[in-house]
Image: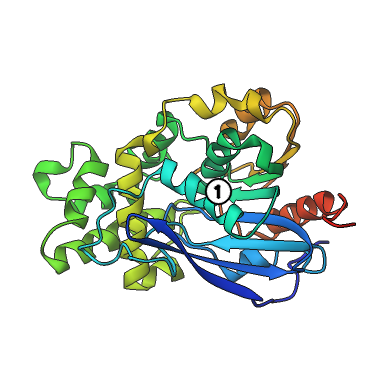
Amino acid sequence: MRGLYPEIEPYEHGMLDAGDGNLVYWETCGNPRGKPAVVLHGGPGSGCSEWHRRLFDPTVYRVVLLDQRGCGRSSPHASAPDTDLASNNTASLVEDIESLRQHLRVDRWLVFGGSWGSTLALAYAETHPGRVTEMILFGVTTGRREEFDWLFRGGLAVLFPAQWEDLRAALPAAERDGDIVEAYHRLLNDPDATVRQRAAEAWCMWESATPAWPPTAGLAERFTKPDFAMAFARIVTHYVRHNAWLEDGRLLRDADSLAAIPGILVNGRFDFQAPIANAWELKRAWPRAELVIVEDAGHAASDAAITRELVRATEEFSVRRLPGD
């Protein structure tokens, strides 16, 4: 039985000047001379968490975590209505990761990402394959339009019809049959703070309901914090309405650039937000990746069975030689 490692605090942290007025929060934990690994959180807009730190043996790994633009401890924060998200896009996040690697004087590192973080990890690794030693992805997404449409434009409504109807009902009647992402994007940027807050809560109720079965009632704890919920909803709708600025299917088509990189893909059998077919198709395009199917698990990364497999994966890759040995 593999559980989380004990709680640990960063030994170093800072703010990376990413340009365009953006400061990206980063921290490092574990062994300063250990095997480098970078963690890419989901959302987009969730921010990194203490849970991510505990997936890695702190005596072996030098773990780097960052809050992507506009969320967590990065600034400006997307919860502020005047925060312009124009420079917050996938290409910018990829270059933020690369700039952080250079800033920390890391030559190559393991890339770890879940949910949206797996899409971002693929985009980074396919852009900079020579800087990636291994990859661990869970709740796998690949940035295809069908994936965005499944989760945010009605596909998943076949399993969660009541929750989808609640999401639609929170919109003005004239907008309920249009593109729900565009409608929420407009409300989340409305001049009226009450309109923005109601939209953020409705959006996050949908996000709360769908990671597991049966559907979760009420807001997930993280969404009870108004600034977190607002930033999350604004960033997610910003990315989805642009299909993450990714050519449809490109990350799967370009997976041959990962041929030299070992990977482990962890996916719950009943992950409704990131259906297992995503990981299956990525495995077909990237034969060196191992696909681990976790029975009876959904999308929630905190599921004990998912956690065990992620810790197993970091342990499996930890046996590689440390820098300087």
In front of the other: 54 or 39:
39
Name which residue lies at 72% across and 39% down. Answer: 263
Q: Is mark 1 on a helix, strand or loop?
A: helix
Q: In this view, does 120 lie to the left or right of 199?
A: right
Q: Position of residue 84 (x, y in %)?
A: 25, 56
- Above or below, comparing residue 184 to residue 244 in the picture: below
**Circle 1 Cα neighbour tier, 10 Å, few/some/many (<14 / 14–19 / ≥20):** some
Where is mark 1, residue-wise?
98
* Residue 202 location, quadrant: bottom left
* Residue 82 location, quadrant: bottom left
Task: Please count the marks in the image.
Answer: 1
Name which residue lies at 39% across and 39% down. Answer: 244
Q: Position of residue 53 (x, y in %)?
A: 66, 67
Q: Quadrant of the N terminus?
A: bottom right
Q: Where is residue 75 in the image (x, y as percent from the top left)?
A: 37, 66
Whether residue 56 is visible here, answered yes or no, is no
Q: Going by the picture, which residue comes out furthest to the right?
A: 325
Name which residue lies at 28% across and 61% down. Answer: 200
- Above or below, comparing residue 161 to residue 308 in the picture: above
Q: What residue type is labelled 1?
A: Glu
Q: Position of residue 213 (x, y in %)?
A: 53, 52
Q: In this view, does 144 lie to the left or right of 316?
A: left
In front of the other: 5 or 9:
9
Whether residue 71 is visible here, answered yes or no, is yes
Name which residue lies at 46% across and 54% down. Answer: 215
- Above or below, comparing residue 75 to residue 150 in the picture: below
* Residue 178 location, quadrant: top left
Q: Is residue 238 left or right of residue 13?
A: left
